[in-house]
Image (cartoon, rainbow, N blue to C red):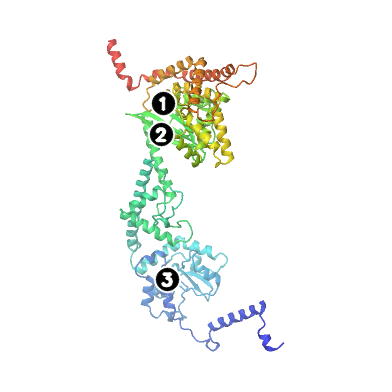
Amino acid sequence: MDKDNFKNKPKGGAQKKRDKDKKALLAEGAKLRKIDNIFAPKANTSNQNEIQVQNQDIPDVIDMETDDPINQIATSNPKTDDLCHTESYDYFAVPSQNSLDRFLSFHPKQESQELVLKKAFQRTNGTNRRWVTYCAEKNKLYCFVCLAFSKNFNSLFIQGYEDRRHIHQRLEEHEKSQIHTNSTEAYVQFIKNCNIEESLGNLTTVRRAQIQKNRDVLQRVIDVLKLIGKRGLSYRGSIHESARTLNDEALDHGNFLEVILLLSKYDAVLSEHINKCVEESSRQPGQGRGSLTTFLSKTTINKIVKIISNMIQETIVNEVNSAGMFSLQLDTTQDITSQDQCSIVLRYVTDKIHERVLCILKCEKSTGEYFSQLVTNELNRVGLNIGNCVGNSTDGAANMNGAYNGFSAFMLKENPNQLHIWCYAHILNLVLVDCTNLVIPSFTLFNLLNDVAVFIKDSYQRMNIWDDENESVGHKKLGTIGQTRWWSKDNALRKIFGEVENPDTGLFVTLMKVLLRIEMDLHFNPTCRVKAKAFKDNFLKFETIITAHIFLRIFSITSPLSKLLQSPNADMITASVMIKTATEQLMKIKNDFDNVLKVSKNFVIHIENKLRDHDFEVETELPKKRNTMNPLETFKTKVHDVIMDKVVDSMQQRFENNFKIIQDIAILSPIHFDKIQANVISNK
């Protein structure tokens, strides 16, 4: 192989590593002293700068002064370099009072090539321990501040510390020790020739000003939180809550931060604080605020809301205790996360009537015993005596009203004098639930009403057809059935079938036309068209029509009563009278199936006349399933009579327990004071 080819041959990995090591050795060698100068005396020209730069905060409070104490000493001793070579003076022994200036001008010495010592000179946060000095001859570490000013000579860093194994732990212990703290104070007094209080005078003033600014900011934050709570708004947004994004007006930061930003435009204190938060937050890498205190985080919001909650709760408890007795109301509902939340409401009388929410608690069970224990524990926690509770009110659910395991039964064990009252509006709703979920035709009807409303609303194309057909009747909408809206079943039924004697008020004809158009429109997918046909066929069944008219008659009696019971100004005597009247009316129509049949057939005739020009076939009678049974008699026995019997029985059973109590309490209503006074005068 010739020489040219040999030179151009690529180098292997081992050769590259050897070349790299050689280059590194040559670079390090250039930094070393020549061998002929190795024994020459070295001028310590960097000592003065080292003293000035490295000794600027022994301790940290010294940095707060405008003048550097050690720099003063270094300046007053220009021949510091010569002191290092004075053999008669030991700079690592306790100095005399006369040689303090000389001693302090020499220290600290932190020259060492040993890695563990280099790390020891630095704290974990990267700042320098400027009180540590190193003696190369003795190979020990000292605290020159304690050497100079401590009266306790038993410290390891006065005698000299040389153990490398626990060096960092010992350094931290000494730095936090009382000996080092006292020595540092003495050092400051010596340098400044004054006491520590005077040295920190400026710092105290600055700190007081900062505290006042923080209080001003926090007061504004509290006022904003009180406003948002008063208006019942949510505090936080879903995103963009970081301090570094507050200067971006295009983002939605949530109600709390948006109000703060709005006020900062007109408030100098908030404006300065927001600008500082944005600036300092943008300097910090990564997420989170780090050590920055903004008073705008979710943690601050939660703490302030909790404090306000405790203050309100304390006020309520004081008022209840001064009133002497109280009643409570218990109810539960699910939040957006599907967690059961239990609210405890207290009612009491001072110079006026009060109704206050004491707390809202998360529920883990739904038994009456659990709710009783939950209420008892909470009342004990806030300082209320359950023996002063004279009454409780709940809904009519079995876990609340059960005679043996209901909430009211367990509360009676705690206080036998308690009076339990149901919510009458909820009782009426339970009556309607009882009768609408009793037989298959009834809950089939209401499922059909809800499903067809959802079917139409789920597609803008189907809604366009609905609006087109519905234009002549004023763009009415179908109603869905909610679980908590007690009037929704009546509303959904009336919107389609109208009033009992006036079917023109309903949207039955419009709905049939819409479903027919969807069924015949080839632009819709087959599944949609099949659903439309199924809905249409079910509504045209005579069983659906007659079942709907059964409930139209029931709702015509119960709906006015339901509205009265939910009215905030409901009169208890009037409500009691209406309940009795409604029960009597239901009993009158209980056996009047012939009238239901007549009204249903009139409805069919009306629909046939309206849909004469369309291809519809409305059933005029119930289909015969067996030759030996009359379908009308079967429907009357198994559907109509069952529904009517249930609604009458539920009205009687659920309301009768509290009639006498309600009538007695109603006398205390201010509405009847004039009547009572007139009766008293007439009796005289």
The quadrant where residue 1 appears = bottom right
As shown in the figure, which amino acid type bears the numbered disc 2?
A: Gly
The quadrant where residue 18 appears = bottom right
Location of residue 462 with respect to 542 vertically, above or below: below
Q: Quadrant of the C terminus?
A: top left
Instruction: Using the image as rendered, state which of residue 30 and residue 460 is in the foreground.
Output: 460
Residue on which the image places disc 3: 55
Instruction: Using the image as rendered, state which of residue 592 and residue 71 is in the foreground.
Output: 592
Q: Residues within 10 Å of mark 3 (few under 14, many from 20)?
A: many
Residue on which the image places disc 1: 563
Q: Nearer the viewer, mark 3 or mark 1?
A: 1
How many labels, in total? Answer: 3
Residue 154, percent from left and from top: 49, 64
Q: Residues within 10 Å of mark 2 (few under 14, many from 20)?
A: few
Nearest to N terminus: mark 1 or mark 2:
2
Location of residue 77 with respect to 626 vertically, above or below: below
Residue at the extreme front of the image, as rendered: 613
SS under mark 2: loop
* Residue 413 visible at all: no
Location of residue 662 with respect to 484 vertically, above or below: above
As shown in the figure, which amino acid type bears the numbered disc 1?
A: Lys
Nearest to N terminus: mark 2 or mark 3:
3
Residue 263, percent from left and from top: 33, 51
